[in-house]
Image (cartoon, helix red, strand yellow):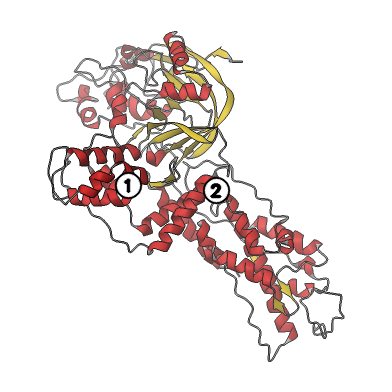
């Protein structure tokens, strides 16, 4: 059943500000200019009443504002910030309950010096003397396991470490294969001199090793499931409920497993996206660690169809190296027949256009810096490896199984993808937040599609962008047809004291052809007031760099996305819009949406693509990696 209900969007609604309105007379600085980012014009016109010879701005009642400068003491609303990463607290494992003497085989008499006679073994009382630090979850699991088991030793038998320990250590040493740092899980085997064994010294070394390896095994399992860093400590733009990893059975399962290393390896994510990242990482590391030949394309201006340039040779070479197998197959004749000429011929143009289409670029055959970057791989192997490691960490923040039906928005790719039955069925260009209005990284569930929406202007835009104009011209919003309320009561814009607090002031734009949200918006309620929506500003989708909004996600084909999530047709969506009425329709079943940020991510064919780090977030993740490894290295 489809539920239709009237929108409850109130004038106090908080939503991201995007898009542009219809043009006003040439002399006016409009909200359209403001939201376009037309800063040069704004500087020359927004305070035009303050220019020499202009009258002093008037108040709401037409009276003088007392000579106050509209620019004076303007308030600002700041967005989230990035943090200096604070690592999790490590605590000493409470070993006080490990004191009861036991052995790894049959019970033996324990002498005063700790020797067990003919069959020396590690005793629990030496476990009580071990000193290991771990995070709270790992410490709790260690304390529970070693306190409650009658025969707890996993990694030691008799007077030496066992094969199980060697297998686990090998798996931990290979942690880089799954995007983790082996240094975080390194354990040194105890040094025991077989020619001069001192039982007490030997047993202390073995029990220290036992507890250390167990702590590293637990840390590895926790990290490979949920990630080694807490994304919410990176910035206010990250919003995740961190996964809870059940560590209680890990040591018991490792002890029971015929191959402890295989057991640990099996705990890594195995979804198709993670597997593609893992395979790409192995391939690049097997190449040469970043010393491969780089193809350089040097263009000082756009290369257009029909032009000539000596760089055409490098363009063809780059496409032969970085193009997909499908691209190279479809254009095999062009690649094979090219002899090194400088003409940008129609055949090479067609090759470039198909490459641009594959990479989500404007497929016009015009080669600029974005196309050059995509052609040359944009990164060395070493920098690609860095992106892969960050991507594998971030993939752990999301559910291991993204679901058979979901929407994925990848901000660095400026793309949105709809998946159904485990397959990508729809993709489209998007516009995301600019660097000063970044889109968050989080996951949620799509609940409704709202047709002919109101745009509730957020306080950040009212204060940061509207207020300067309103102090100069309090009637400004009335002229544009916006609805203004104070404490829930409709008022004229000109009656508001724009020098006072705007906390109880709300502004919204009614549905119209000029509405900032266009024909529809797709809602997944969240504390960041981010959603997907249409926009009347279509030209932005033609750009390669599309970090241009105030934080929400603008869709290049919103009707198709709305039809997909509603499980209906584009024609039905068109009828809903044609009604002209503001109303919302619930999606038949909530759909996961991943508002993500991956600079490396596989496409629908499983080929990993690389993207510019538009917000510079990867560097913050890498700093968090370094801080975590440093903190963990200070064990005692």
Instruction: Tell me the number on the disc at residue 96.
Output: none
Q: If the image is split into quadrants, where does the N terminus sit?
A: top right
Say few, some or many: other residues with alpha carbon within 10 Å of mark 2 (under 14 / 14 to 19 / 20 or more): many
Q: Secondary structure at mark 1?
A: loop
205 sits left or right of 568 in the view: right
Vertical relation: 618 (above or below) 428: below
Q: If the image is split into quadrants, where does the C terminus sit?
A: bottom right
Instruction: Tell me the number on the disc at residue 396.
Output: 2
Q: Earlier in the sequence, mark 1 or mark 2?
A: 1
- Residue drawn at point x = 55 percent, y = 33 percent: 421
- Tell us which disc is closer to us: 1 or 2: 1
Residue 314 in the image: state x and y as whole percent.
21, 52
State the residue in front, 34 or 227: 227
Name the residue carrying label 1.
Answer: 323
Q: Determine the image quadrant of residue 501.
A: top left
- Residue drawn at point x = 70 percent, y = 72 percent: 130
205 sits left or right of 424 in the view: right
- Residue drawn at point x = 54 percent, y = 50 percent: 230
Vertical relation: 52 (above or below) 7: below
């Amino acid at each position: 059943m489809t539920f239709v209900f009237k929108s409850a969007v109130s004038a106090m609604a908080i939503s991201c500000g995007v898009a542009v309105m219809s043009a006003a007379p040439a002399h006016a600085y409009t909200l359209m200019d403001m939201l376009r980012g037309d800063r040069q014009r704004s500087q020359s016109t927004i305070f035009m009443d303050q220019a020499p010879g202009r009258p002093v701005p008037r108040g709401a009642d037409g009276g003088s504002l007392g000579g106050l400068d509209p620019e004076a003491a303007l308030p600002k609303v700041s967005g989230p910030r990035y943090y200096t990463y604070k690592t999790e607290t490590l605590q000493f494992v409470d070993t006080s309950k490990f004191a009861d003497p036991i052995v790894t085989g049959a019970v033996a008499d324990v002498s005063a010096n700790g020797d067990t006679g003919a069959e020396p073994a590690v005793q629990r009382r030496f476990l009580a003397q071990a000193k290991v630090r771990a995070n709270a979850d790992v410490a709790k699991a260690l304390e529970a396991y070693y306190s409650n088991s009658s025969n707890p030793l996993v990694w030691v038998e008799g007077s030496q470490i066992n094969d199980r320990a060697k297998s686990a250590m090998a798996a931990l040493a290979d942690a880089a294969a799954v995007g983790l740092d082996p240094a975080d899980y390194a354990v040194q085997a105890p040094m025991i001199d077989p020619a001069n064994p001192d039982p007490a010294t030997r047993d202390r070394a073995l029990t220290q090793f036992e507890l250390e390896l167990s702590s590293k095994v637990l840390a590895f399992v926790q990290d490979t499931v949920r990630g080694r860093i807490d994304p919410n400590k990176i910035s206010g733009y990250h919003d995740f409920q961190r996964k809870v990893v059940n560590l209680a059975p890990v040591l018991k399962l490792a002890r029971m497993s015929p191959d402890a290393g295989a057991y640990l390896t099996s705990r890594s994510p195995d979804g198709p996206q993670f597997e593609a990242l893992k395979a790409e990482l192995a391939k690049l590391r097997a190449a040469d660690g970043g010393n491969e030949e780089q193809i350089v394309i040097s263009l000082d201006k756009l290369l257009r169809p029909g032009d000539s340039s000596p760089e055409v040779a490098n363009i063809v070479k780059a496409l032969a190296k970085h193009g997909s197998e499908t691209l190279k197959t479809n254009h095999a004749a062009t690649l094979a027949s090219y002899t090194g000429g400088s003409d940008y011929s129609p055949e090479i143009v067609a090759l470039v256009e198909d490459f641009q289409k594959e990479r989500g670029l404007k497929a016009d055959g015009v080669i600029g810096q974005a196309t050059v970057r995509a052609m040359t791989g944009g990164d060395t192997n070493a920098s690609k490896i860095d992106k892969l490691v960050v991507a594998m960490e971030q993939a752990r923040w999301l559910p291991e199984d993204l679901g058979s039906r979901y929407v994925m928005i990848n901000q660095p790719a400026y793309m949105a993808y709809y998946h159904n039955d485990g397959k990508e069925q729809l993709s489209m260009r998007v516009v995301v937040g600019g660097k000063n209005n970044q889109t968050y990284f989080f996951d949620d569930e799509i609940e409704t599609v709202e047709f002919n929406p109101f745009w509730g202007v957020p306080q950040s835009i009212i204060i940061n962008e509207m207020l300067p104009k309103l102090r100069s011209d309090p009637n400004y919003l009335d002229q544009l047809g916006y609805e203004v309320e104070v404490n829930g009561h409709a008022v004229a814009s000109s009656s508001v004291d724009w020098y006072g607090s705007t906390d109880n002031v709300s502004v919204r734009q009614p549905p119209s052809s000029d509405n900032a949200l266009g024909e529809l918006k797709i809602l997944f309620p969240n504390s960041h007031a981010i959603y997907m929506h249409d926009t009347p500003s279509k030209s932005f989708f033609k750009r390669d760099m599309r970090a241009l909004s105030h934080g929400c996600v603008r869709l290049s084909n919103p009707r198709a996305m709305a039809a997909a999530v509603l499980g209906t047709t584009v024609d039905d969506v068109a009828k809903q819009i044609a009604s002209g009425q503001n109303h919302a329709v619930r999606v038949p079943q909530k759909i996961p949406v991943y508002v993500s940020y991956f600079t490396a991510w596989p496409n629908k064919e499983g080929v990993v693509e690389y993207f510019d780090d538009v917000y510079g977030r990867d560097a913050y993740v890498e700093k968090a990696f370094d801080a975590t490894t440093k903190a963990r290295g200070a064990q005692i």
